Image (cartoon, rainbow, N blue to C red):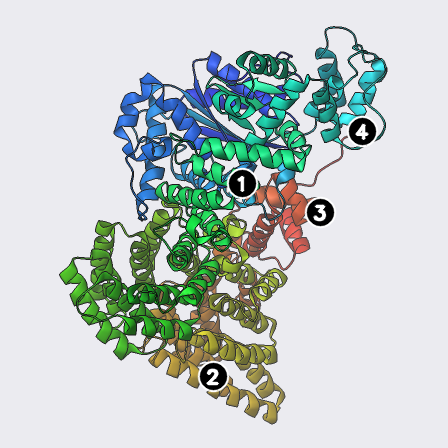
Amino acid sequence: MPQTFDTPFIGRTGELARLTGILDRATAGEPRAVLVGGDAGVGKTRTLTEAATRAAATGMTVLTGHCVDLGDVGLPYLPFTEILGTAAADTRFAAAFADRPAVNRLIGTAPGTGTTPDPDGRLQLFEGVAGLLADLAATVPLLLVIEDLHWADRSSRDLLRFLLSRGVLQRPAPGGPPHRLAVFGSYRADDLHRRHPLRPLLAELVRLPAVDRLELRPMADADVARLVRAQRTGPVPDSTVRRIVDRAEGNAFYAEELLAALPADDPSGAAGPPTGPEALGGLADVLLIRIEQLSETAQQVLRTAAVAGRRVGHDLLRDAVRLPEEELESALREAVGRQLLLPGDDATYSFRHALTREAVYADLLPGERVRLHRVFARLLAAEGRPAAGAAERAHHSRESHDLADALAASLEAADHAQRVGAPAEELRHLETALELWSVVDSPARPGGTDTVTLTLRASAAAARAGEPHRAVQLTRSALARVGSDTGSELAARVRYTLAGNLMRIDNLEAAFTYSSEALALIPAEPPSSTWIWAAATHVMAARYVGRDADAERVARQALEVAERLRLPDAQADLMISLVGLEAHNRRTPQGRSRLVRARELAVAAGNLPVQLRALYNLGLGCYESGDLDAGLTWLADGLDLARRAALLTSPYALELRYVQSVLLYTLGRWDECTRAAEADAELLPAAVAFTTAPALYVTLARGEFEAAEAGARALLSPDGDWMAALVANIVLIDAAALRGAADDCVRTMRAAVERLTDGAGSERPDAFVRLAALTLSAVADAAEEARLTGDAQALDRWTGIAADLVELARTTAARGEDGTGQGPEGQAWLARAEAEEARATTGPSVAAWERAVTAFGYGEPYELARCRRRLAEALLTADRREEAAEQVRAARATAVRLGAVPLGEALAELARRGGFAGAPERERIAALTARESDVLRLLGRGRTNRQIGEELFISGKTASVHVSNILAKLGAASRTDAVGIAYREGLIEPETSPSG
């Protein structure tokens, strides 16, 4: 049941109305979530408590979970453990829990699973929790309240993301039971610094249609005054109220504490709130003034409870404080009566506000703090404490300087985090254990492990947590710890693990070196799983450095051994590698059929990374063979799997995101491409920005040159990602070509060849064909200008450069990264490169541009339209005007649909030059969407993009996209031109000022 308050609820009627409206919708079967933010003390808990009380009064079941701040301790899934523990005690839900055994790991009723990672366990856990909550919500209307999300551990954040984006907020299938569920979460807005881990999650969740954000602003002065008067049964002088209102600055908790800190001998408050040095010290001093008014025994109880954390069980507090039962009860009654502690239904006591606990803890003497931490560590180590308590015990042991017990508890906490699928918390505990290992005497260290194994385990946790560079650092550390007494299998494991991690950060030669060492350390016979996985890693590393013969020999040998040992995930991994080495590669139906089989084997083995690898290769193979829609389907399946398993930052999930972004751009689904990039901007770390960087192609094609080039330069760094450098160079070369800066194009192209060759696993990356074609566009423009002006020297220079570029394109297309000819996309770019080279050398060639138009017909509308433009120029040169006009009309239709403003302008100029401007102006204006009409109306008022965004509740960037679309549809050269056309065509009406 929600907690109760003695004072009336004041000043949040609007916010409470929003929350109760959400509750009404949830009760009617429309699941919703609200994220409630505000500064510490502004009233989040009180507002949520009031809403929860009303929910309970209408028959909803309210379940509350709390996140806690215990410094470096990670308590995985803590708020959900609390919620599910409460629900499990309700007999109404017994059948639902029996049907969802996966969730028992969170409430401590599952049998022990050891410490072996369960690759699919986290997904099962997430789906189990989502299914259980759906079952509970089908039984009764349900409200989940999760407090203090700013302290949530990473696993809790991942589970919350899953539940809100893919789980409990999804509408049930037709005919299924309704999801009568609401989720309220609170967080301190003033704690969210720029790099706080909750920020990207909030940015992602608030974009979901079923998730709202509610910001609690400081209360109005009048409401603070009402709150102050409501706290006292007798009158409070107006002067006192005014001083409290001035100092509280709209913070309800601060106002209450200022009032409560009034001297005991002046209950009316005539003297006003505290002044002097203690009043200038901030809220903590005010809180301590209140606490000093308690008896010494009550203060002792509060100090002990503060060391335990925000909340403490009665039995644990009793054992720690060691007071006679009657004295303890009296002290607790005093603290509860002063609204410093709040009793819970589960025999616990919580600080009414986290600020109170923080102030008490900070005021402890150093020796007192150490002593109390030692008491709690000893109590938590007592027999019968659950495994989840190990993390808390580790914290108390470290704070009390009992490093041996802190080491043991950290390892227990890591085991628990692994069992419940919390890799980030597992990594944190393992790193703590590694720090403690060297300072704990050998006899006091736990048995059964060593630093090499422990460090290797930490690197695996880092990889699962999406921290590849940290995984490399840890594996290198494990290698440095390998000695002459280390067994050959463990030494090999360290090396092939390091090789795998190095491949993820593009350190390919080093990866091959370590995979070779690993394979040499252990014999192939007798067969072992260690040798098979060493071989599988070596196959990938050998392929990356162009040693295909070595890779194929080892792969076939290892596959035969894997089949003998019945290791389906190793079979799958080796099959995927072999598909890339055979003539029937992923571009062929036969190759993709083998990839589907590999995926099936990986699913049977429950190996998620290998499943993602298979789906990535299926999607990329379809893309390379020109089957773009099928490619998107495979990629979506892979991303959905990664999302459900909370592996969105894992290596293959990032590759899936990148290829999906490229495909959306290629298919002309530009709005989807940019929306995905915006959604991921705050979700993904800057180090993997390449995944959504193809959205910059859209930005450039829509005429936002400065934004596109700035975004591209941000991707470039000396030690940056290879894919980021590729995208950046494509954007910068195309931008220079669109500006007509041929010299810039050539300089950027040469730098790109050097940079991309150095970081690639092959001599000529496939993308060189595209880069050459884009550069040739500017070179051909410069050559045509030199031909028109009679500058023979310049013409010779440009035609020479064109010859070099087309040769680069031809050789790359003939033998790409995998040693075979390129697919439809590469051949299309080659056709464009050859057409541009012909334009530079002899002038526009109808035949060459017809080949380019045909080649891009595989499914790339923007490049098809750009080639149609050049074909129209060639047709005009050949005096085939009607055919040219047809090409212009087709290309302009595409430019308008995509919002490709520069292309639209170039086509309009070509139409004017050719004397076939087209239909009357009204007929060539495409229909505006409702949102574009709104934007056009604000353009007519002279609004900037930022102002349009503010008025329409969209981002300035989105407003810019709408403006670009409007310019293209109206055939306007500028915003002013667009407004003029709109007035002439009656699309907007002049506004008149009201008379008066």
Residue to which mark 4 is pinned: 278
Q: Which mark is residue 942?
A: 3
**Dot 3: element:** loop
Residue to which mark 1 is pinned: 202
Considering depth in this image, is 168 or 621 the residue closer to the camera? 168
- State which tag comes first along the sequence, 2 or 1: 1
Vertical placement of 725 versus 919: above or below?
Answer: below
Please state if 91 lies on the left or on the right of 185 as rendered.
Answer: left
Callout in the foreground (2, 4)? 4
Q: Residues within 10 Å of mark 3 (few under 14, many from 20)?
A: some
Please state if 152 lies on the left or on the right of 39 as rendered.
Answer: left
Q: Which mark is residue 805?
A: 2
Q: CA distance from mark 2 to mark 4?
A: 75 Å
- Indicate the position of residue 545 as horizontal and vertical percent values: 37, 76
Quick check: marks 3 and 4 in contact, CB under 8 Å? no
Q: CA distance from mark 1 to mark 3?
A: 33 Å
**Dot 1: element:** helix
Residue 309 seen: no
Callout in the foreground (3, 4)? 4
Amino acid marked by disc 3: Gly
- State which tag comes first along the sequence, 1 or 3: 1
Vertical placement of 222 versus 392: above or below?
Answer: above
Outermost residue toward the left? 564
Q: CA distance from mark 4 to mark 1?
A: 37 Å
**Dot 4: element:** helix
Image quarter in which the C terminus is found: top right
Amino acid marked by disc 1: Leu
The quarter of the displayed image where residue 559 is located: bottom left
Callout in the foreground (1, 3)? 1
- State which tag comes first along the sequence, 3 or 4: 4
- State which tag comes first along the sequence, 4 or 1: 1
